[in-house]
Image (spheres, grey):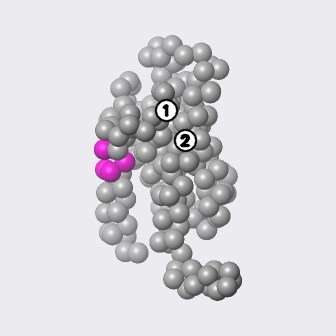
Amino acid sequence: MNQAVTMLLGATALYVAAVAQTTLADLVAIGTIAPDALALVAVVAVLYRRDSAPWLIAATVGLVADLIAPGRFGVEAACFVLLAIVVVSSGVSGRSSLFTQVAACAAASATAAFASASLHGAFGESEMSIASTAANSLAIGVYTAAFGVPVLMVVKWINEGPLSRSERLEAFS
């Protein structure tokens, strides 16, 4: 895809995720656990990066998260860079199976949520115990990954060519 089109689609996805995070997250929340739409966008962007620095992409998404989240500015950006490190270190990419992409999404989202909650706790903005922070972060990671399965499927289908789709269909017949 053309780089300008890719940037436009990325900015649109980021905007939609920010709106969903601020307006719709409460509707799909289970208790205090809600999926992190911005973390999902960051994971997808890092998985399908093309010659661009995944840290820069994740930091940009993190800055948007900083703008909509209460607390100190820069915490979410740092956590999203950590998210990119987890995804890149796992070796998972857009060519990996959907299962491994979902697992990487869960691990990266949980790590970012844990880092964010821990940093907010260190700054005195939150008073959760380490055990409840870990449990909530794990639940957020799993919920974000489950919420992201359709998104990851559609992005994977778009990025694999029509020839490979037809070849896969012929393999089943």
Q: Are the two marked residues, 1 and 2, in contact with CB atoms closer than 8 angstroms?
A: yes
Q: Position of residue 63 (x, y in %)?
A: 37, 40
Q: Position of residue 72 (x, y in %)?
A: 38, 25
Q: Is residue 158 above or below residue 14?
A: below
Name the element at disc 1: loop
Q: Which residues are magenta?
A: 15-19
* Distance Cα–Cα, label 1 vs label 2: 9 Å
Q: Amino acid at mark 1?
A: Ile
Residue that protrudes farthest toward the front in the picture: 173
Q: Position of residue 121 (x, y in %)?
A: 51, 18
Q: Nearer the viewer, residue 3 or 116?
A: 116
Label 2 sits on residue: 143
Q: Is residue 81 visible?
A: no
**On-image quarter of the N terminus:** bottom left
Residue at horizontal 60%, vertical 45%?
A: 106
**On-image quarter of the C terminus:** bottom right
Horizontal placement of 86 versus 49: left or right? Answer: right
- Residue 30 - label: 1
Of helix, strand and loop, which mostly describes the magenta segment?
Answer: helix
Residue at horizontal 61%, vertical 82%?
A: 169
